[in-house]
Amino acid sequence: MRFERSHARGTAFVAVAGSLVLLAAACGSGDNGSSSGGSSSTGALDGRGPITFATGKDTSGFLPKQLAAWNAAHPNEKVELKELPEDADAQRQQMVQNAQAKSDAFTVLNMDVVWTSEFAANQWITQIPEDKVPDLGKLIPATVETAKYRDKLYGVPITSDGGLLYYRTDLLTKAGIAAPPKTWDEMLADCQKVATLPEAKGMSCYSGQFEKYEGLTVNFSEAINSAGGDIVDKDGKPNVNTPEAKAGLEELVNGFKTGAIPKAAITYKEEESRRAFQDGKLLFLRNWPYVYSLANKTDGSSKVAGKFAVAPLPGKTGPGVSSLGGHDYAINSFAKNKATAIDFINFMASEARQKANIEATSQAPTWASLYDDPTLQKQFPYLAPLKASILGAKPRPKVVKYGDVTAAIQAAAYDALNGTVAPDKALSDLQTKLQSLITN
């Protein structure tokens, strides 16, 4: 899941294009050529004709091919791509503005999994009867839950995501380190050993994503969850002002203080941190699966191709806890041609389509069977730790006012990492702010 929405360039489409076109025809209920205008009501999934697909900016080169497969089989129900900005917060803002205006400019929305509660509570997206999604039971259950609000389905999971620890196998091996670290302390110790190598000159130990945006909410959440803390408790109440949360935040704060995390990382989003790792500037990197294909390119763009592997995120006393990422496709409540929209979503959610997508972009699928596919396991050795990451992941707070909640988290974490506010006060102030935003 990337909050800048940039993916690896697709290479596997040609081999599967023919079968996908056939699948597109099978998924639809027939292209009758009618553009009835549909219904703008929030409930009915009716109306056939052209639709639009609103998504963050795609740089993979693969998404247009996906849409072309659908369009080839549905000439009177074509989908038009509506590209939004790379930044996730800007994507959400445009979708919210579109919904508040009751506009039908967007039909299908590619939504971050944490937006479901807000959009559903405001009736900006349409409830989808579960019998309209025939493959729902074949998806990883945790991904299906991301698309639900009050136990009703409002989207279909297309991609999932779990955080992974990328590490330089060549340097760890040369330093006599046989296995990747399981805890933060082990990771810091490994960095000290590797730092003595000539090849490590100028390298930093570790980075995640620490710019003030959604990625910071993810990294903050993972640090707290990996230390045994929570942002909200099992009853949905704020619980961030705890010793466990303090321990997690202090790991990041101390990383910046000691230089284990480079100062430049305060400006890193996914792409900046990926480039730092690929350029040989980091020993360890926390990022999403999409990095794997890009970092392994042999076209000269990566200095670490063939020299890295992935492992679960480290925690305080053992393996850490990832934030559950991913994207769901939902239907704008005010859109036309919703019958076409649900057919298109089912096409994009199909096993064949998801397999083609991971082959081209290394994005995590939501089909459980794909993690056990021998051909994919050979191509993507990270699938086993990724599956473990997703199965053990915790969602970010599922709240109606998510935009306000994530902004509060980002502000508190950023101030603490910058050293302008002590961790204790940052968490105390955040607790007070969240109590005013989260009501049951």
Image (tube, grey):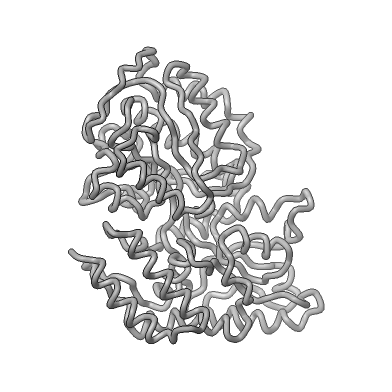
Q: Nearer the viewer, residue 418 or 29?
A: 418
Determine the image quadrant of residue 180: bottom right
- Name the residue located 68 percent from the left edge and 65 percent from the top edge: 276
Q: Position of residue 127 (x, y in %)?
A: 25, 39
Task: Give above or below for 156 relative to 86.
Answer: above
Task: Give above or below for 18 relative to 230.
Answer: above
Outermost residue, right direction? 198
Q: Position of residue 372 (x, y in %)?
A: 50, 47
Determine the image quadrant of residue 339: top left
Task: Kindly tell me whether residue 367 is visible in this rendering.
Answer: no
Task: Give above or below for 350 relative to 437.
Answer: above
- Name the residue located 24 percent from the left edge and 72 percent from the top edge: 435
In this picture, residue 246 sits left or right of residue 37: right
Q: Position of residue 60 (x, y in %)?
A: 61, 42
In this picture, residue 252 sits left or right of residue 113: right
Task: Kindly tell me whether residue 355 is visible in this rendering.
Answer: yes
- Name the residue located 44 percent from the left edge and 51 percent from the top edge: 326
Q: Position of residue 333 (x, y in %)?
A: 28, 37
- Name the residue located 35 percent from the left edge and 52 percent from the top edge: 115
Quadrant the C terminus occupies = bottom left
